[in-house]
Image (cartoon, rainbow, N blue to C red):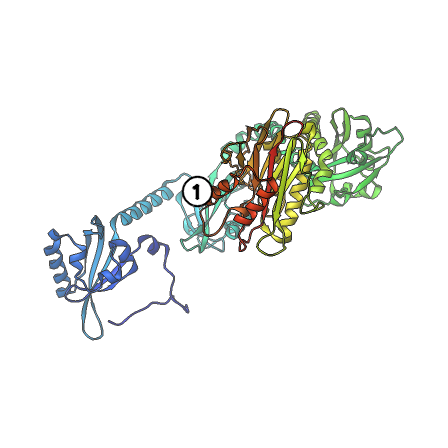
Amino acid sequence: MSAARSLPAGGDGPARPSGLLDVLRVASIVLDDEGRIVLWSPQAEELFGYTAQEALGRYAARIMVHEEHLDLVRKLFTEVMRTGRSWAGAFPIRHKDGGTRLVEFRNMRLLDDQGQVYALGLAVDQSTVRRLEQDVALSTRIVAQSPIGLAVLDANLRYVSVNPALEQMNGLSADEHLGRTMREVLPLVDAADIEEAAREVLRTGRPVVDRSMTGRPPADPDSDHAWTVSLYRLENTLGTVLGVAVSVVDITDQYRANAEAETARRRIALIADASARIGTTLDLYRTSGELADVAVPELADAAAVDLLDAVVRGRRTALGPAEPALMRALAVRWVDASDAVPAADPPGEVIRYAPDRLITECVRTGLPVMVPQAKDEDLLRIARSPEAAEILARAGVHSYLAVPLIARGEVLGAIDLIRTRNPRPFDEDDLLLARELASRAAVQIDNARWYQNARDTALTLQRSLLPSHPSVTGGLEVASRYQPAGATSEVGGDWFDVIPLDDDRTALVVGDVMGSGIPAAATMGRLRTATHTLASLGLDPAVLLEHLNRITVELDEAIATCVYAVHDPRTRRCVIANAGHLPPARIRAGGTPELLDLPTGVPLGVGGVAFATTEIDLEPGDRLVFYTDGLVETRRDPLDARLDRLLSLLDTPSRSLDDVCELLLRTLHEPDNFDDVALLIARVTAPGD
C-alpha cells in the first residue's frame, strides 16, 4: 500500500500534531482483506495493550473482540469491504489485560495502487471523547453566558474572539472588534498599560490579575467607567504560544459609589501595610526604601528618606541652632519620571544642609515641618541649594512635609514628602498619617542601621573558606573536616562553623550552597559571615534561619541548606533548626546512633515556609554529627541505605573524634563524587574536662 504524507501550507516539513490529536490519542489499525492486522500504530498499543509484534499478522477480531461479538464484527467487516461504505460507532473491545473498554470506531475501505483492498480502523477511547465533548460544551456555555467580558487576543494583540458580555460593555459588535487592537477599539480608554502588560504576559507567561483600567467606552462616551482586567497566556499542549486570554469585570458602580470611601480605606490600610512591608530585612537602604514605597503615591508624589550621617556611623548627635546637618540620603521615590528628580539627593551620598533649611530644623527640633502652600522662598529652604530650588519650582512642587524619624528617644533623620501632581496641599490628616508611618518605620530603620555593617560584611567573602576552631569550647570537644569535590582542589559551597557564644554556649553550623566553584564559595562566605553576625545577637535558631533566608533571597539565584544548633552546657540542652538539610546524627553514650527527627524546613532562598526549633537533651559523652550531602549521596545507592551505612560507621564509641572523621571520609566519600563534603562532630564533655 502506497504511503501518503501531508505538509503544512507553505511549510518545509511535516506538520506538528495539534493539541486535540494529542488529547484523543487516535489509534490506527490496517487490516488486509482477510481481517489480519498489517499495520498497528503506537496509539493502538496503548489502547488495546498489545505490542506491534504481538498484533501484526493476527486476526483482529480474535484479539480485540469478545467471542459473543465475533459474528457481528465479521458482518460489519464484510459489509465495509464489499460496499466501500464506512462504518462508525461505539463498540466494546477486549484489552490484553482481560478488561473491556468502550471504543469509538470509524472503519473504511482503502485501495492501494496495486488494486489491493484494505480496511482502516480509527479508534478512540469513548470516555476520552465524551470528556472532551463535555469540556467543549461547558466552555462554550460558560463563555456565551458569562457576565464577565471575555476575549482572546492573538500574538499581535488583536481581537480574534469576544463574548456577548464584552460586546455589551464596549457597545460594539464582535465583528467591530475582530482584527483590531484594544486601543483601536477603545480610543477613549487608558488601555496602553493593559497592552504593555499583555506583551509581558506573552513574553513571560506570568498572568496579570485584576489590573485596573479606566476610561469612556463607545457604549457610554460621556461617562467615566472602570474595569478590572486579567490576562493569561494561551498555549497549546506543545507549548506554542497562541495569544492572550482577557477577562474584564465592569466595576463602574463600585468605582463611582466608593471613590471617597476608598481613599479613606486606603489610608487606614496604609498603616497596616506599613507594618507588614517596612522592615522585612535588616538592610538599612532597603528598609528606608520600603518606607518611601509605602508613602508614594498614597501620601505624596515623592518621598525621600535621609538619616544624619553621624547616626548611620553609630554615633549619637545633637545639633545646635547654628549647626548644619550632614544628611546621608538613603532612598528616593517618585510617582513617575519627574522633572524634580535632579533636585533629589542620590542615595548613598552625604549632603550638607545649612542651618536654615527645613530638614535641618526638623532633625534639630525633632518636630515635623509642614508647608501647605510652598512659595519660592519656601523652596529655597526646602532644597539643598538655590539650583535645586529652581528645579523644584519648574517641577511644580507646591506642598511640603518633613517628619522626623525618632527611635528610642533619638532623632535618626527625617522623611521628606512633596506634592506636584496631586493638587491637594498637605493637611493635618496627612501629618497624622505621616507621623504614624515615621514612628513605625523609625524602629525598623534603627535596627537596620546597627545591623548594616554586619550585612555589608555578609555580602563579601572576607573570611577564610576553610574555618578553624578550638578543639574544645563551651563544654564541647569538636572535630571537623572539609573535603573538596572529587580529586580537584576547587572548593564548593559546603561549610561548617563552631561559634562561641555568651554563657559558654556554642553554635554549631553546617550548610551547603548549591553549585561549586567561585560563585558557590562566594555565596558560602557571605552566609558564613551573616551567620556569625546573627549568632552574636542570641537569636532563636528558627529566627536566625529566617534572617539567613532573607539574605539568601537577595543573592541572585542562590539556594542553600543549613542546620543551626546552639548547645548550652549549663542546661545540657541543644536547640536546633533545619533549613532543608539532611538530619544530624546523635550517638548517646553507650547507645545506638540515630538520626534526629527534625522538621526538615525548606532551603534558604526558597522562602514561604516558617522554620521550627527543636530542643534535645545532651549528656556528657553524647555526640552530634553534622554533615553535608556529599558524604552520603551517590548516583547508584538509595539515600536511606547510605544513611544506614553512616549510622553503622558511627557505632564506634572507642574512636576519637578525629579518627571518626577520617573513617567517614575514607569509607563514604567516593573519589568520583562531584560534591564536596563538610563534616562536624561534637562530643559533650563532662564538667572539669
x then y, percent, for residue 242:
44, 54
- Identify the residue at image location x=68%, y=29%: 504
State the residue lying farthest toward the right: 322
Q: Measured along the vertical axis of the image, is residue 507 above or below residue 133?
A: above
Number of marks drawn: 1
x then y, percent, for residue 2:
26, 72
Q: On the image, numbered disc 1 is attached to which residue?
A: 149
- The answer to whether residue 42 shows anywhere in this view is yes
From the viewer's side, name the closer residue of 472 and 400.
Answer: 472
- The answer to whether residue 289 shows anywhere in this view is no
- Identify the residue at image location x=27%, y=57%: 45
x then y, percent, for residue 446:
72, 31
Please name the amino acid that badge 1 sits on: Gly
Quarter of the image that includes the C terminus: top right
Would you say 81 lies left or right of 309 here? left
From the viewer's side, name the closer residue of 668 and 2.
Answer: 668
State the residue lying farthest toward the bottom: 114
x then y, percent, for residue 603:
55, 41
Q: Measured along the vertical axis of the image, is residue 632 above or below residue 284?
A: below
Image quadrant in which you'd find residue 262: top right
Instruction: State the SS at label 1.
Output: strand
